[in-house]
Amino acid sequence: MRANTKERVLHALMFVILIFLVLGVVLFNVIFSGINYASVLLGSDTLQEDTGVDNATGVTEPENAYHAMTIHFLGNCIVGSILGSDGYGTFNAMAQETEPAYFFEKNLRLFANDDWTIGLLGTVLSDNGELAPVTDGIAYKGTASQAEILTAGGVDIVSLATLHTRDYGSEGYADTVAAVEAAGLQWGDDEHAVYLEKEDVQIGIYLCSVGASSMDDSTDRIVNWINGAVEKCDMVVIYLSDRGVEIESEWWPPLGQACIDAGASIVLCNREIGPMSVEAYKDGVIIDCLGTFLDGGERYGEKENFVYALTVYLKDGTVSDWEGEMLPFYNYEEPWQPVQVTE
């Protein structure tokens, strides 16, 4: 009896070992050979085939599906020093010592992942050392290569209709146009609007200024452009800068409202004076004084400025809706490195 019992135990042990060996072989093949043993054991009709891209050509988007266009609007970007100085402690010296990506590196993820980032260029960019300033005020100048600071930081488009791009006259302005184009930037001014397209939707953006003429003349020029743009664009945005004429506080609301009345959806104005403000008007919004995002004249620049983050929702080749958000930034920690306030 004892012998039979030992044999039974031995046979049972061998059976258990055999089971483990079989399971081990199956597991090995599942992991390394990709064999679908579940379909073998349960039947091929039990599990659905893996649906790849080729099998999904008949899938249609739900009725409420949409695409989004994201645009960030920055304030002044002064990527040069006062009178073009490159002495110790100046912006131009820092630009020569560091990589172009340094200045925007803390915001690169934000600006590089949107559709477009737009800023106001507040600097003449030229390698011509013979240029002399033509203004009685502060003049800013950087080298042509300093336009790469903007492209390295995720900026796509700049407005040249600003106060300081003409600090060195028409020759300095022409050099600046050449520098931004060489860096791969799009640009706009009073004579050149910018048109952005995505998913068969076109947005017209007029990067313009209130020039040396009267406020009424400037308003007429801007409204005339809007009247033409609304005929061919799905959405119209105005981004104003003061150049030659300081936009007084009492002038600003009527100017912004006139733009909305003409068909613009958003009107931004970055005046040299005044606190940031947002005004809802009819179906649009009027935003004043984003501030200076990067100030080459001061190591830490303005302590606070704002970026307007615009999201436009696109559906069936039209603008179905849009929304905007004011993002606060500061420049406290490292010289000439704006940082988004997230707390």
Image (cartoon, rainbow, N blue to C red):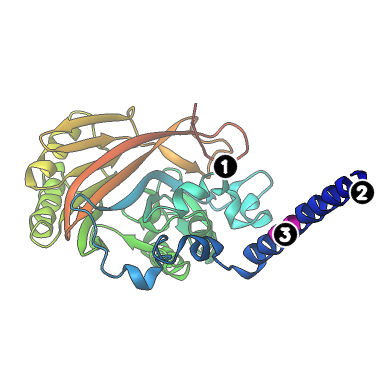
Q: Earlier in the sequence, mark 1 or mark 2?
A: 2
Q: Amino acid at mark 2?
A: Ala
What residue range appears in magenta?
Answer: 19-24
Q: Residue at x 33, y 30 (%)?
A: 276
Q: Is residue 341 shown left or right of residue 256?
A: right
Q: Are marks 1 and 2 in contact (CB under 8 Å)?
A: no
Q: Is residue 20 in the magenta section?
A: yes
In terms of depth relative to the viewer, which is nearer, 194 or 121? 194
* Residue 164 point in image, percent of width and height: 40, 50
Amino acid type indicated by mark 3: Gly
Image quadrant holding the N terminus, namely top right
Number of marks present in the image shown: 3
Q: Between 244 and 210, which is closer to the camera in this rendering?
A: 210
Earlier-in-chain disc, 3 versus 2: 2
Q: Which residue is mark 3?
A: 24
For the residues labelled 1 and 2, the Cα–Cα distance comes to 90 Å
At 67% from the left edge and 60% from the top edge, which residue is drawn? 27
- Which type of secondary structure does the marked residue at label 3 adopt? helix
Which secondary structure, mark 2? helix
Toward the front, the furthest residue is 1
Q: Which residue is mark 1?
A: 336
Picture coordinates of residue 204, whole percent (x, y): 21, 57
- Is residue 27 found inside the magenta-colored segment of the image? no
User: Which SS class for mark 1?
Assistant: loop
Q: Which residue, as the protein is rendered here, is positioned at the far bottom?
A: 54
